[in-house]
Amino acid sequence: MQWLELTVQTHPDAVESVSELFSGYSRDGVVIEEPFELSDDGQDYRIKVGEPVQIHAYLPIDGKEEAATREIAEGLWHFSSIGAHFVGELHTRIVDEEDWANAWKDYYFVTHIGQRLVIRPSWREYTPKEHEVVVTLDPGMAFGTGVHPTTHMCVEQVEQKVRPGMKILDVGTGSGILALAAAKLGAAAVYAIDNSSVAVTSTIENARLNALEDTIHTVLGVLDEVEAERMEGQYDLVFANIIAHVIGSIAPELARVVAPDGLLIVSGIIEARRPDAEGPLLAAGLELVEEMKINDWLCLVLRRKRA
């Protein structure tokens, strides 16, 4: 099978908007390629903050790709015409199945997050220090490698907030990186949910790679009213690393599943879209207790108050 790769270069502030546009057409998500430079003989890297970001999406060549490409190009034109953020020209190329499945691996390296957590791509070697906790990850085409600021901040929160014995929910689990890190740090049970079959497959496989199949339960689905009622007040810690307007749309459900005095950690929020997420979450009865920021990306920590 062949795929049509769509690539556009954007200003960092436009990443969320362009990713959301691409996601409407690419069934397997998008790849966000941030500029970086290697250090420590290729064992570590540094993101070049503020420099343009490449975003890739993949469409199956099935007769519908030309129409989809025209619609995407029109959407990008509207972004660029606003003039607030730079959005470059749309480039396309045809890639074979093997190239599509493996080329992205060149961009991912061992990542150190916080004081102890190390995210090791499954195809790279790494010898951990005594105090380090290593998560082995093969994200496939699912989002979540620790490279993007939204995931980076969430993983830091996992390290800071997870305590042994906790029960945790990961909404929009992607590659499973947050679920894996939580389980490695002693969570008793992790429930991971995503509406993408690619993400669910990736999380299940990564749980197996880390011998965490008995701790992480992964399901294909969404956090709707029925699920939230079933899981009401069950989770000490809930993560939702998605995008602002989706977080806002499920704010009542997110608030409902958090245990009294438990925490909800949300990310994937560009600063300009903060009200889309924060407003509905506060209206759902949560209180903001902490926030983090990398560039224009936000991570918010909220608490469910006792009745």
Image: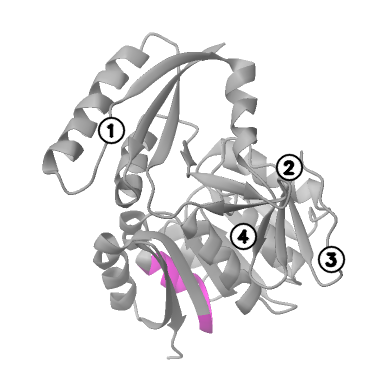
Q: Which mark is residue 63?
A: none
Which sits earlier in the primary sequence, circle 4 or circle 1? 1
Question: Residue at horizontal 51%, vertical 52%?
Answer: 47
Q: Quadrant of the C terminus?
A: bottom left
Q: Which mark is residue 178?
A: 4
State if disc 2 and disc 1 touch (CB < 8 Å): no
Q: CA distance from mark 3 to mark 1?
A: 42 Å
Question: Residue at horizontal 35%, vertical 46%?
Answer: 15
State if disc 1 and disc 3 touch (CB < 8 Å): no
Amino acid, disc 2: Glu
Is 141 colored magenta in this rendering? no
Q: CA distance from mark 3 to mark 2?
A: 25 Å
Amino acid, disc 3: Lys
Q: Which residue is mark 2?
A: 205
Which sits earlier in the primary sequence, circle 1 or circle 2? 1
- Please state the horizontal and vertical placement of residue 154, each as a whole percent of the image: 54, 65
Q: Nearer the viewer, residue 118 or 169?
A: 118
Amino acid, disc 1: Gly
Q: Which residue is mark 1?
A: 88
- Please state the horizontal and vertical placement of residue 50, each as a whole percent of the image: 38, 53
Q: Which residue is mark 3?
A: 129
Q: Residues within 10 Å of mark 1 (few under 14, many from 20)?
A: some
Q: Is residue 144 visible?
A: yes
Which segment is the magenta one? 252-262
Between label 4 and label 1, give the one nearer the viewer: 1
Which sits earlier in the primary sequence, circle 4 or circle 2? 4
State if disc 2 and disc 3 touch (CB < 8 Å): no
Between label 4 and label 3, give the one nearer the viewer: 3
